[in-house]
Structure formats: structure tokens, C-alpha cells
Amino acid sequence: MNNGCICCTVRGDLIAGLKKLIKNSQKSGKVLDGVLIETTGLADPAPVAQTFFADDYVQQHMRLDGILTLVDAAHIIQHLDDEKPEGVENEAVEQIAFADRILLNKCDLVDGEEQLAEVEARIRAINKTVPIKRVTNSEVEMEFILGIRGFSLDKIIEMDDAFLEDSHDHQHDNRVSSVGIDVPGEVVQQKLNQWISWLLKEKGVDLFRSKGVLAVKGMKEKFVFQAIHMLFANSQEGEWGPDEERRCKMIFIGKNMDREELTSGFMACMAK
Ligand SMILES: Nc1nc2c(ncn2[C@@H]2O[C@H](COP(=O)(O)OP(=O)(O)OP(=O)(O)O)[C@@H](O)[C@H]2O)c(=O)[nH]1
């Protein structure tokens, strides 16, 4: 599939991809057990689910088993409370509303039963009947998420009577965007640490997701970092190959991002 948003621009690609999988399986005689589609956290689930009903060929050969929504227990309330511009859907609300199963993840990051109960109550206010499982690191038995026959067209149409209409309009929040940085060279660890601390402290509320693989001066291994809002983790993973170009590659996804500020801030950490 091409790059793009699975619920908008590349939905035609999704249908073509599904058809190809079915045809390959028929040709090779190998049974296709299932297809897992992982959207970005910012996708509207409705048009993706609609794919399984919009195309006759796909509808005849596939059944939508269920929609699984992974909820970040530590940050979900902030996203549910985010006031969107007029006409823009709140993706977090949509993803919970459409869910046939919910994995309430990162329970270890939440302060006890009271806060978890509050999160569950917010989920229940959107989707009364969905089974919810509390987990850490998404550890779950497969029976909870696969082969569940959880998707019900009647239930969805009750909630969204335009679900089967072709013109399923939805508008994304155009305050949310991504900034990618990919530059050859190395960073200076101390400058990088200072910049990341500044970034998470000052921009963490609006920074939904950051991740990167960096070449750090004097470090044989690749420096890998992951962050969700202000929660940051890093590790050293595998050494740079002798012929591999040492470079820094990162992506930041968030609200009201300033490409110029992020890029110049990072470039100031590069080794001369
Ligand atoms: N403490 C804690 N950390 C977790 C848990 N689940 C994932 N993480 C960490 O959170 C960071 C981001 O992982 P995810 O939230 O799974 O990432 P994601 O949003 O699915 O990321 P992409 O699909 O790559 O955009 C990583 O550093 C994970 O190790 C959890 O239950 N508890």
C-alpha cells in the first residue's frame, strides 16, 4: 500500500490489497486465516470497517471479525476531553464507540484502582457493552481478540445510521500533523539529553508520539528512543554496521507542531 491515511486516501489501496490476498490464497491453495489491519492512532474506524461492506468481492470472501481498540490508560482522558474544531471528530471517542473489544493498556502507569475505575467509566459512557480487559504491555490471550465474531452491523447502524452510505464524510483535526527528521551524522549525547528534556517538558502535552533511531557520537550502538507525551524511554539496540551510514532519523506526531523549531532545535545537537 502507498503511504497515506487508511481511512481516506488509501482506502482504494486497502480494497485492492485485500483482493490480492484472497486471490493469492486461492492460487496457492494456502488458506488465508485472517488479516490484521493496524491503523494509526488517528484513524477514524468507520470508513475502514465500511471497506468490508462497500465492495462486493471483499464482502463475499471476508468477514469483519471485530474492531479492537487499544486504550492508553495513562493518557486517554486527556484525548477524550480534547475539544475539537467544529465538524471534526474526536478519533479517541470514535475508536472507543466502534470497538468490539478494548484492551485497557499501560495499567501499570496509572495510580491505582480509583483512576482505572474512572477511565473505565469514561469508556462505558461511550460504549456500554464492550468487553474491557486491563493489561500491561498489551499482554492478552489471543481468544480475547481473534476469532471473536464481535462485529455487528446492526449495532453499528444503530449508532451511525449513515455507516453504509458511500459518502462517509469525516474530517481530521488539521492541528495534528507529523514532523520527520532524517539527517546524516551524529548527535552529542549531552546536548540531545538537554533538548529532549526541554521538548517533553514544554511540548509534551501536545506531543502524542515521538520515536527515533540516532547515531550518538562515541556510541557503537544505535540509540533508540520512544515517547508518549512526557513518558520517555530509550535503549541501545544493535551496533551500526561497518558500512552503514551513521545518521539520525526521528518522527514526531502531535498537535500544533512547529517544524522549524523542532528541526533547528535538533540540528543544534549535532556533532560538528
Ligand atoms: N510502562 C508501560 N509501557 C508500555 C506499555 N505498553 C507499551 N509501553 C511502552 O510505550 C512506548 C510506546 O509504545 P506503544 O504505546 O505501544 O506505541 P504505539 O503508539 O502503538 O506506537 P506506534 O504504533 O509505533 O506509533 C514503548 O516504549 C513501549 O515499551 C505498558 O503497558 N506499560
Image (tube, helix red, strand yellow):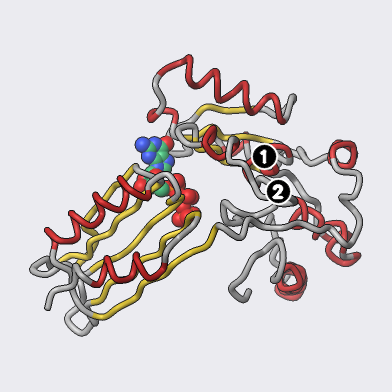
The picture quadrant where one finds residue 201 is: top left
Q: Nearer the viewer, mark 1 or mark 2?
A: 2
Of 197 and 218, nearer the camera is 197
On residue 64, which mark appears?
none
Q: Secondary structure at mark 2?
A: loop
Residue identifier under label 1: 93
User: Residue, x 81% and y 55% (percent of image)?
Assistant: 50
What residue occupies the far top of the structure in this picture?
114
Provide residue 77's location: percent of width, then percent of height. 54, 32
Of 56 and 48, nearer the camera is 48
Provide residue 236's location: percent of width, then percent of height. 21, 57
Instruction: Tell me if residue 92 comes above or below residue 128 in the rendering.
Output: below
Q: Is the residue under label 2 in contact with that under label 1 (CB below 8 Å)?
A: yes
How far is disc 1 from disc 2 in space, using C-alphas? 8 Å
User: Residue, x 77% and y 69% (percent of image)?
Assistant: 15
The picture quadrant where one finds residue 148 is: top right
Quadrant of the image where one finds ligand 1: top left
38 with respect to 165 (left or right): left
Of 66 and 54, nearer the camera is 54
199 with respect to 222 (left or right): right
What residue occupies the far bottom of the structure in this picture?
243
Instruction: Tell me if residue 154 comes above or below residue 195 in the rendering.
Output: above
65 with respect to 212 (left or right): right
The picture quadrant where one finds residue 38 is: bottom right
Residue identifier under label 2: 89
Provide residue 187's location: percent of width, then percent of height. 18, 69
User: Residue, x 62% and y 21% (percent of image)?
Assistant: 121
Q: Which class describes the residues within 10 Å of circle 2: few (<14), some (14-19), or many (20+)? A: some
